[in-house]
Amino acid sequence: MLEINLLKVENPSCLWGRFVKGPGIEAVENKKEYDDLQMKMNLFYHEVNLHVQKIKLSTIESGQVCVVYWSALRSWCRAIVESLFLGTVGTQAMCFLVDHGERVIVSSDEIRALLDTFLQLPFWVRKFQLAGVHPMTLHVSGDSSTEMEAVLCETQADCTAIELYLTVKNVKICVNDDLVSKKFAYFTSQKAHQTSGKNGVVDRSPAVLACDIFSETQNFLATDGCTARSLSDFRLRQQDPIVHNQGECTFSYCEVIIKNSLLYVFQKCPIFVFTEQPTIEEELVCARLLQLLNPDPLNTDVGSSEVTIVHTDPSRSGIMVHSAFTLDPCTSLANAPITDTFRRILMRNKYAGPSVAESYCWPAVARGCDTVLISHSGDQPLTYIPPFLAHMQLSSVFSALSARTGPIAVILCPGWEKAQTVIDLLEESQTFQVLHPMVILLGLGKDEAKTVKIQNNCQVVVTTPFSLVRLLRLHCFLFLRLCHLALDEVDLLFSRAPDEMTIILQHFQRVTASEERVSCPRQIIAVGKRWSRPLEGLILNHMSNPTVVVTVMEEAALYGNVHQIILLCLDCTKISVLLGALDFTPDVAQKTLVITNSAEEAENVFKAVSNTSAFSLKVHEELTYQFDFVTEQWKKPIGPGTHVILVTTNECMKSLGICDATCVVHYGFPSSPKLFGSRLFCMSQNFQNLSDKSTSHPAKSVLLLSERNARHVIGVLRYLKRTEASLPPELLHFAQGVLRAKEEQKSDKPLCRYLKSFGFCRDSSVCSYRHSISPITDQPLQPDSGTIVVLPLFIKTASVYYGRIVSKKEDRYESLAAAMTTYYAAEKLGAKEVLEGGLYGVQEDEVYHRVRVTLVPDKREWMFCSVRALFLDEGREQEVKSHQLLQLPAQFHTLPPQALEIIVCRAMPIDAEVKWNPKVTRAISQKIKGLQHQAKVVLCLGNTVFVDPMVRMTRLPGLKTFINEYNVHAEILSTGMGTSNPQHLDLLNELCQWAGPGASAGDAPLTTLVFFSFHPQIKWFQRDDTVTLNIKLREPVDQRCEFFPDRVVYSACVNDRPYRADLELHSNITAERCSWEMKCNEPVIRLVKQERGDWKMLLKQKSAFVSLDFDRFEEDEKKTSNGKILEPFALNSRS
């Protein structure tokens, strides 16, 4: 049976209720899911900055699903419009609340559109009817709220037929049968056939129970519900209304039975009664009268065509736009400021944009403005290329420069790979006939820059900072027409080539500042994913009235120069640390936002801050109806010295739309960078504005970091290191330990390929590969010293190859190859089944190879498919047709794979690249592939040998003399795209030294591990010659206290938690006379002053963990000496 909760009874054919639990139901509604849905709806529709016109229905019709506000519950609810009528205050609608089973009358202006997000859960309330019975009375109404059991009989489109069962004092009764027995209904359909007589006539007068189960409950229970008597013995109570089969009646006994039966069991849902307000029936009567007096048709079109939808403030969407002029975003490709050709190309490629970043960046670039864009898509050329090309092609101001030759625009990319991507996009845009773009990538060759020829009609050059600087040194006159400078991935440009960027910007400024260029355009476009400090100098020194668009909120906080403060504390002391960090007597007006992770945390914090002198407010998910009040109080102007504190939660913070906070306190740790950024964005109005170079009150962020947030330390530090925040040493030391622990978790990962190739990894904190030497995993499998003969067969990069060691005596591989050729010449059996990890044979020309299948795709219904296979004796991995795989006999499995990795040391790409240019790899491949080389092994890790040098030796004909034909290292450098890397071997040897015998992956020289320690709470007071410190730790162990003339260091451990306090004192002490002892199970430190007198403060820098002992002050204040009050310390003392 199913357990249901009936909320309202209109008649036996209309019962409103909810499924509670039971077997056989596909989706038993979860109350928590509906509570969460209610909370999200309240947060969305209560949002202060919500654009109401956008969420109003354009037309309102009966049967429409919508959202209305129900004052009884103080909540927004899903509803269905049942009818429309003209009320006393205009057009009104009768709406049925589909999750609560109630009807409300609301004004049509108060009806909101229901978003698809809020339709993921089915309507909670369902309509039921009693199955197999037909009422013999007219319409009845009633309501109740109770839980009972039911059996599903039939499911229709809008109703579910059930048999309803009640349990009265352990006796279960079927309401369907009981109504028939009382002659208030009769059986129909299958139920009728089960109770019909021999002639098939429906029995409308079945036997009834011996007593009334409601008025005579005890008698009914005494009969066990089995004794029956004739219908003539059944008498209605005199006070009950008589039910007529025909005609009207205001109240039926059928309703009495159902309603009383529902009310008999315990009720769970409260019923709200507002006697001062008219009922729905009274409102309907008045409305129908007004509609009768006013015969004009109803106008339900509340969203008329006169309503104009204006673009909302970008800050409401978490987008920061600082511009000297009003920037209207483009919302579609149709109104985007790009050429028709590029528009057709984007549509052909099914481009879904413009994105949020592009909608604001494109108009600024198309107008020729200096533009800075920081976005997650900042590494995509489409963020600026389409409007940039449109501006260049449609602009006619270049006629003044026609007397000269050279490009008008330069696009700088951080590397050759990105430059190739940009030039490919320019080719696809069909601009070659007009702009004639070209890519220039120069190496270190002496004459390479001299041989560069730029076409006279070339308007756009794509290059890198290093290549452009080399070109400017010899051909600076080729760039005298330069008007546009596009910086692609500007954050990488400044981090990898800071000196080159300075030279380029100075040249651009010098060229564009000449008098003859007054009428010519001048534009710098900078696009990237992250904000960096050099961008501030770019805007201030090289841009005029720039437009700054930042769509990543945490990056916007970096741009806004938010002051970051990190406080370490225990989770149990967060409130006290919070109170110590707040300034309750500010010199200027302060608006502080304290953000928690739950409503319970918000209540606890509000209880603490409400006892201070600050004006405190709170709002969380359970108080969404107070949004308007809280917002009104928050927006009131305040004067200097006033401090307003608002305690809220993450979800409510988004709905409040606050942008003018001066301080954000992260009481609850942000679970993601996006959430951290959205919190910081609450201070966006106080961010610095580099567009108009205005200054504002500096914004401040306070992050409380406790032991529960240890796993997030690395992510926090990665962000905070980009700020100028002073980081606690304990936090840095703990982060080093976390990095070491993460490195130990990579013990089963391969060694980082960049670490092997160059001796370093650009960012080991985010790289997923191992960066330490493991004595077990990296045990040498090949010779680790001496001279060997290698045969490179697969050239992976310019300095990394795969091949074999050629033995001077017996070559086992040659024997294997000969045996395989002989075997397959006689018999070639195709593979019956292709399995991942299986060994097979493959024929290429006349050569047979052993391969291991590494990936088998889903075949589906394909007859032929390709699999990924590793060639065991050559090291290359490529796709092979499955029907080309041959069975490999067991005798060919015994020889281990012969391929090994060969790395030429001390060579790396130029220009801070980590990937070799393909033309270098291609040149080296053509030079060395398939040829034997002499190589000296300097190191071996696993199956990788590091060689230096590797040379090709040729024997002179007729002589026993060999000459070095070429050195591979020198060949790499001669291409001009490679440079020497002298630290390569030194870095690898250092890693090997740290990974001595028995060493673990965590022993690599990342950093020295120092355990994270917590700062104890300290109370202090002073006398004329001494200072007493009470350390608030109960029964500490492993205590240690060191005294110095200007500081005190105390450390201990409580419950396996380390504590440490390094106190830099405001004045000097006599270290040899200081002492400490245990009092009342707590350590007490006694400091002796070098000079008598009061200290204005204890520490040189204020600490949130140190405060005055006011309890001791109150005790000493009562003591008198010679009729005078003792003053143990000054009242204005600070920690």
Image (spheres, rainbow, N blue to C red):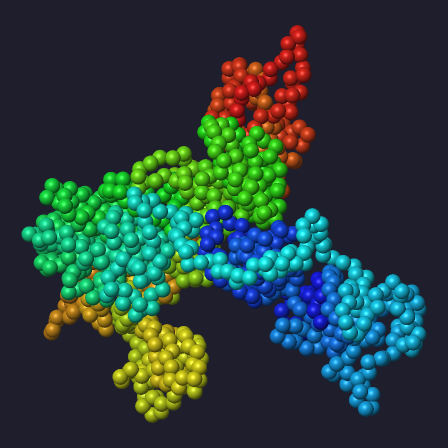
Frontmost residue, 991 versus 812 = 991
**Looking at the picture, how far across and down is residue 312, in whole percent?**
41, 50
Frontmost residue, 895 versus 300 = 300
Where on the picture, by quarter, is residue 252?
A: bottom right
**Looking at the picture, how far across and down is residue 1005, in whole percent?**
41, 49
Quadrant holding the N terminus: bottom right
Residue 1006 visible to an observer of this rendering = no
Frontmost residue, 301 versus 247 = 247
Residue at 67% x, 69% y: name it: 127
Where on the picture, by quarter, is residue 967?
A: bottom left
- How many numbered callouts? 0
Residue at 66% x, 7% y: name it: 1122
**Looking at the picture, how far across and down is residue 956, in whole percent?**
12, 70
Residue 297 visible to an observer of this rendering = yes
Describe residue 421's horizontal placement relative to residue 190 as left or right: left
710 above or below 1089?
A: below
Residue at 43% x, 51% y: name it: 317
Q: Seen from this angle, which residue lies furthest top?
A: 1122
Describe residue 528's horizontal placement relative to residue 478 as left or right: right
Residue at 26% x, 60% y: name it: 338
**Looking at the picture, how far across and down is residue 352, in whole percent?**
36, 64
720 above or below 458?
A: above
Frontmost residue, 97 versus 385 = 97
Q: Seen from this angle, which residue lies furthest bottom?
A: 826
